Amino acid sequence: MPALPSSLTSSLSCAPALTVAETAGGLPAALAGLPDPRARRGVRHRLPVVVTAAVCAVVAGYRS
């Protein structure tokens, strides 16, 4: 078994490149089936939109 590369960049360089069309609907589409535990009254935004925004914030480094 070959040794693992020590750099993430070198391991990503062999991965096939993804295009925007392939990844555009990924996260919202994956979250579309989430059951919404919130009460109907007062809900202004759909749950997949709220969770997608939260995931993007965490990926960007926000903590609160």
Image (cartoon, rainbow, N blue to C red):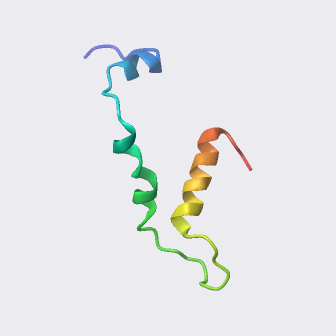
Give the residue displayed 34% in from the left and 29% down from the top: 17
Percent coordinates x, y for residue 33 in the rendering: 41, 68
> Can you say which quadrant of the picture contains the N terminus?
top left
43, above or below 5, in the image: below
Q: Extreme front residue here?
A: 21
Percent coordinates x, y for residue 26 in the rendering: 40, 50
Give the residue displayed 45% in from the left and 61% down from the top: 31
Q: Extreme left residue here?
A: 1
36, above or below 2, in the image: below
38, above or below 2, in the image: below
Give the residue displayed 64% in from the left and 74% down from the top: 44
Q: Tell which of 15 and 4 is nearer to you.
A: 15
Image quadrant in which you'd find residue 16 = top left
Residue 63 lies left or right of residue 37; in this view the side is: right
Q: Extreme right residue here?
A: 64
Residue 16 lies left or right of residue 50; in this view the side is: left
Count of numbered tags: 0
Percent coordinates x, y for residue 41 in the rendering: 65, 85
